[in-house]
Image: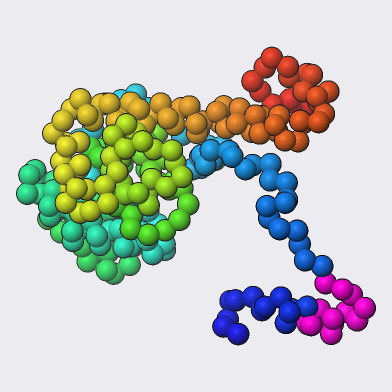
Amino acid sequence: MPRGHPPPPAQRDRGVRRRRPGVRPRAAPPRAHRRDPVRGLPPRPPPGAGRDPGLRPGRRHHPGRGVFLGSYDHSPNIDTALHLAGEVMPRVRRDLDAHLWLAGSNPPPAVTALQGEHVTVTGYVPDVETLLRRARVFVAPLRYGAGMKGKIGHAMSQGLPVVTTTIGAEGMGLVDGTHALVRDDPEGFAAAVVALHTEQPLWERVSTSARELVRGCWTPEAMEQRLFDLLQRTVWADRPEELSASSGTSTIPRD
């Protein structure tokens, strides 16, 4: 049996009987028959759940500067840095004088070797907000990985427009052209980066929409309301007396 794979049910049952004579293994009910209180909820738990995203007013960020942020202990971030430097930014520089910042802890030799005239590898950055406010666009051409990307949510909270991929936008409720620009090929990705540098109305529209999405979905107050709505539909659905103290309000009962 390959390591990491569960044994077949029959083999597993025989093992149970050997260890616990007289015990008859019982299969768990199929998932479809279990009560799933979160089924149907939109997939929007925020990056950095419960943390104030530090919303900033929109502003014109520094032209020519693209930034990517991530821990390089995570292999998708290494791949992204190499892809940015090797495939994306050379295409961007055909149209404008662009500089790439690769920020984040523990960059491996393959990433630090990218340091040069057009690339700055910063390593760990203690003040991420200042870093983001000094860039014009957040570039995250992630090619694999799973889950919501906190780095993208953080950039959006600072009003920094994001160019990412379908993988990067996964689960965040982003609408291409509204909250971010989503492109999966290097040529299209580079064109989107150039557009955010050269088209100020586009930059301002994406910046504003991204901050509004953060404010509406990812602030502590918005999260509290989502939790309250979930509890109201599930845990408290059969116990209306527990809602009496909060009837007509939008906050979770405190007692």
Image point 82% across, 67% down: which residue? 26
Residue 81 vs residue 179, the one in the foreground: 179
Q: Decide if residue 54 is in sight here.
A: no
Residue 159 falls in image quadrant:
top left
Residue found at the very far top of the displayed protein: 248
Provide residue 212's location: percent of width, then percent of height.
40, 26
Provide residue 157's location: percent of width, then percent of height.
40, 33
Q: On the picture, is 117 further left or further right than 112? A: left
Does residue 95 lie above or below 243 as drawn?
below
Residue found at the very far right of the displayed protein: 22
Image point 29% across, 43% down: which residue? 182
Residue 72 falls in image quadrant:
bottom left
Residue 180 falls in image quadrant:
top left
Q: On the picture, is 97 further left or further right than 49? A: left
Provide residue 183's location: percent of width, then percent of height.
26, 47
The image's colouring method is rainbow
Does residue 201 lie above or below 28 as drawn?
above
Q: Is residue 63 magenta?
A: no
Magenta residues?
14-25
Does residue 49 lie above or below 112 as drawn?
above
Provide residue 92's location: percent of width, then percent of height.
13, 48
Q: The N terminus lies in which quarter of the figure?
A: bottom right
Image point 44% across, 41% down: which residue? 172
Q: The C terminus lies in which quarter of the figure?
A: top right
Q: Is residue 19 magenta?
A: yes
Image point 74% across, 25% down: which residue? 253
Q: Decide if residue 70 is in sight here.
A: yes
Residue 211 vs residue 131, the one in the foreground: 211
